[in-house]
Amino acid sequence: MDWTLLVTQLLNGVQLGVLLFLLAAGLTLIFGIMDFVNLAHGSLYMAGAYFCATVAEWTGSFLIGALAALPLTFMVGLAVEMVVVRPLYARDHLDHVLATFGLILFFDALVHLVWGPEGIAIALPGFLDGRVTILPGIEIPTYRLLIISVGLAVAAGLGYVVTRTRAGMLIRAGAANRRMLGALGVDVNKLFTLVFAGGAVLAGLAGLMIAPITEANIGMGNGILIVALVVIIIGGIGSIRGAFVAAILIGMIDTMGRSYLDDLMKLFLSDQNAETAAPALSAMLIYILMAVILYFRPQGLFQPKVR
Amino acid sequence: MPIRLPSLRNGVMFAGLAGFALMPVFTGVTGQPYILDITMRMMCLAIAAVSLNLILGFGGMISFGHAAFIGIGAYAVGIPAYYGEYSGFLQIPLAVGVSALFALITGAICLRTRGVYFIMITLAFGQMVFFTFVSIEEYGGDDGLVIDTKSEFAGLIDIEEPLALYYLILVCLVAALYLVKRIVASRFGRVIQGSKSNDDRMQAIGFNTFRYRLTCYVIAGALCGLAGALLGNFTGFISPDMIDWTRSGELIFMVVLGGAGSLFGPVLGTVVFLVLEELLSALTIYWQIIFGPVLILVVLFGRGGIDGLLSRLANAQR
């Protein structure tokens, strides 16, 4: 067994998991509180990546780019919420899905118009570009370690905010009963706007962190959005804890499936059959998992207590 | 005694179908065969939209993975053709059968869920089909598969001839509309519509709505599989791009634009959608900058879609 590969793949799984969590956290909060389905969440992920790439290009520093991208994405989130999303809260889910689908088309074309069809690469500063030894004989890229650390730190911070602070209390109260919250004198519209823009920042953070690895490109958010949706379905829509558990689970299963499924299948299939079947099966793995979980628990693993 | 005129809605439907039937005459005279191509594509997608409308408009099942059935139908033509099996009598039943089977299996899981979970789980199953075809290298993977010989019907009809294919698709569209009309008017259709407005009550008065809804889902899937088989025959090239989730989103938009829950609305929606797409994309490559906001405006202000507009017009006349 190749231990270096195993450790690397485990860390890749965690990395995918934390990125998925950053996207899923916003999605699940927006759904939990506003009962709003936001397919355009992937566009905010893309926005984060493009803002970071542009500022990084001007200033020559990835870190400045990253710091500038977060407030910019926040403002895009504010604008989207106030212009398009707010009139839709009173509508049904079909209208949410269609309108945010329209937003995706708009944002993809807008990025095409502003930045052109080519992806934009982001150069990492020297101290992030190297590798670190985490165990004797096992090195991994420093930057991947950073993504994982930032992701886990944000997850912990978000958990703290939601369960221990007044803002978190309002968020949970909103998820339980938003009309009652409004009746108690809380400015629900403001809360909704801030939660939406906060979710946008988390998505933007995920996008700008992945951009140095994959480049910022058009439609980058659309593929991962679907996986993030799978995450919140498995985790139970509205549950941050569920989103975290499901994100790590999906990240792991997807990464491990892609790297080890063919070896596993060679144990009971001929080499050739295993090599043809494994890619298809590993691509389907997370959807099969979702189907199985939903068959037994139609509301996901961590169903929020009040809905 | 005054002559009873057909209602505005029926009038539009008959005019629309007559328009489809006479289109080849028009393009033959004006010499614009590409319009015929666009119309064929329109009719194929209209069948898919009509099938989606059966579950979405009448049954309230918002499927975001309907394009998967188009893909399954198209690959059911393409894969046998890849092995040199061109018989339409095999391919078409295969397309319809496999689509129905896929609808049965996934529907049994999806229909256990409600609301937004249903939207997302159908979306995920659509993606599953997408990634499956992407990862099967044998059938072209990402690059897709060329169908060089169209389905053969043992001399009965030769669809290599564009006009024959055109009228075959039109006949299928009319048949699909008739099927949906009959279903919606039947006791079965009433149960489906009742379950859309209040599922608990339908169960309380003794209907096993799950079975009704699943049957409806399978019918819609099979019908959309047929649309896929026709589309595959028409384009002669199939790829996972046909199954991409944005295609499912477009299908929903066609239905909603035309008027979900009306018989002919989805056909009108498909026509307007594709015409708009053609016009705008001829205007600029950034056409989706206009198209996206149009979609949002239709959602915000266009209640009931084109069909809603027609019925408001008809009421205003009275």
Image: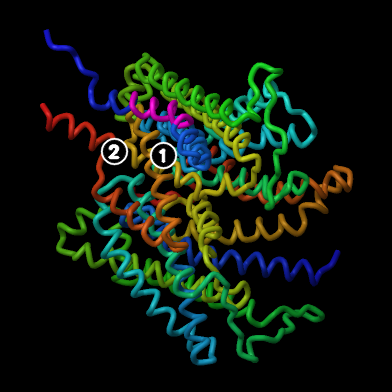
Which residue occupies the foreground of this view, B308 or A43?
A: B308
Q: Residue at x 25, y 42 (%)?
A: B303
Circle 1 chain: B
Residue A78, percent from left and from top = 31, 70
User: Is residue A11 rendered magenta in the image?
Assistant: no
What's the residue type where badge 1 is placed?
Thr
Q: Is residue B225 left or right of residue A190?
A: right
Q: Residue at x 37, y 20 (%)?
A: B184
Which residue occupies the foreground of this view, B129 or A140?
A: B129
Circle 2 chain: B
Write down the residue under mark 1. B270
Establish if A58 lies above or below B120: below
Q: Secondary structure at mark 2?
A: helix
Query: Earlier along the polypeptide chain: callout 1 or callout 2?
Result: 1
Q: Which quadrant holds the N terminus of chain B?
A: top left
Q: Residue at x 38, y 71 (%)?
A: A161
Write down the residue under mark 2. B306
Which region of the structure is painted magenta? B14-25
In three-dimensional space, the C-alpha distance between marks 1 and 2, rounded to whole angstroms, equals 11 Å
Establish if B188 lies above or below B64: above
Q: Secondary structure at mark 1?
A: helix
User: Is residue B19 rendered magenta in the image?
Assistant: yes
Residue B44, percent from left and from top = 51, 34
